Image (cartoon, grey):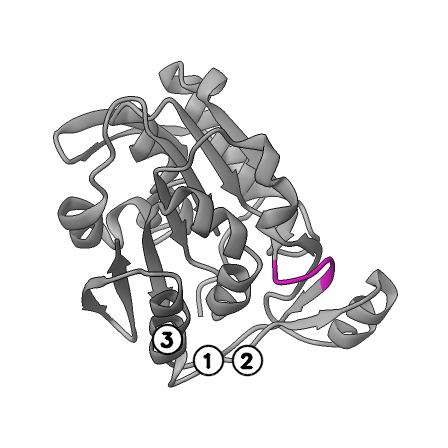
């Protein structure tokens, strides 16, 4: 098993990337083959090419943005604003993904159109404990409870604060797009965004983590159906898939 260098100091390479005809550069680590900071911009490229149809002036919410493969692409395609959520998920809880995403934005002159939050989203306010392997994250009321849940766990574990997207509803005049890739937390995030979805009805791309919950796609389908959404389709990608709703 490859152990990657996840320190911010490892992110020193500048690499060109093209998405839907827009070319930009990213800050990443290429010295280690398969490093997520670089590989993430190659992974899921088919979904971005087919569905990530960002237009000039769009407002985009990228929930579970990691190193920014959707966020930086959206900015290159002309988004007026991208608000991204990239909580620290790599020990020792250094927000390397958020740091690297900001560096990529700066490299392209996009920094004034990008906001990166290092907290997460959920259906209520509290703390989330994330575990390595195909195990769902667990919600707790306090940081102490969440930290106790991951104590002694091996692999990539994390603890970070969460709140509903609806708590930020007044921060937006409109929302055109929403992408959610949250390792099985998609339904809880959608539930916490009910008023946002009702008010703005953005286009949505979700990632379906069947290895965490085999019924995850059906649950999101049913919930979004109650809000008037129609599913365009689902694209299988390795062990997961992506669904697109309008």
Please give the residue where the numbered disc 1 appears in the rendered image.
212
- At which x and y percent is residue 91? 66, 56
Report the magenta stretch's main SS.
loop
> Would residue 66 appear left or right of 156 to someone viewing this image?
left
Please give the residue where the numbered disc 3 appears in the rendered image.
222
- At which x and y percent is residue 115? 54, 29
Disc 1 on helix, strand or loop? Answer: loop
Q: CA distance from mark 1 to mark 2?
A: 6 Å
- Pick the residue in front: 222 or 153: 222
Disc 3 or 1, which lies upstream in sequence? 1
Say whether residue 124 is magenta: yes
Please tell me the numbered disc located at residue 135.
Answer: 2
Marks 1 and 2 in Cβ contact (< 8 Å): yes
- Residue at position x 60%, y 70% in the image: 155
**3 or 1: mark nearer the eye:** 3
- What is the magenta range? 122-127
Say whether residue 63 is magenta: no
Few, some or many residues within 10 Å of mark 3 (<14, 14–19, 20+): few
Disc 2 or 3, which lies upstream in sequence? 2
């Amino acid at each position: 098993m490859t152990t990657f260098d996840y320190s911010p100091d490892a992110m020193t390479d500048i690499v060109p990337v093209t998405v839907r005809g827009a070319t930009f550069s990213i800050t990443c680590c290429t010295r280690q083959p398969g490093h997520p900071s670089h590989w993430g911009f190659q992974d899921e490229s088919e979904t971005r090419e087919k569905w990530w149809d960002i237009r000039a002036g769009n407002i985009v919410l990228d929930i579970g943005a990691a190193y920014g493969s959707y966020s930086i692409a959206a900015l290159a395609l002309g988004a007026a604003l991208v608000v991204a959520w990239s909580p620290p998920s790599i020990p020792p809880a250094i927000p390397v993904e958020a740091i690297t995403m900001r560096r990529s934005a700066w490299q392209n002159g996009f920094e004034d159109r990008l906001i990166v939050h290092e907290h997460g989203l959920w259906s209520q306010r509290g703390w989330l404990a994330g575990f390595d392997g195909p195990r769902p994250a667990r919600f707790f009321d306090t940081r102490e409870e969440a930290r106790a849940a991951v104590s002694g766990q091996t692999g990539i574990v994390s603890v970070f604060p969460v709140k509903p997207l609806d708590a930020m509803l007044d921060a937006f005049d409109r929302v055109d797009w929403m992408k959610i890739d949250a390792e099985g937390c998609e339904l809880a995030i959608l539930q916490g965004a009910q008023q946002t979805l009702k008010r703005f009805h953005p286009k949505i791309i979700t990632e379906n983590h069947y290895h965490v919950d085999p019924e995850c796609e059906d649950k999101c389908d049913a919930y979004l159906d109650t809000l008037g959404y129609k599913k365009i389709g689902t694209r299988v990608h390795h062990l997961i898939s992506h669904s697109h709703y309008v």
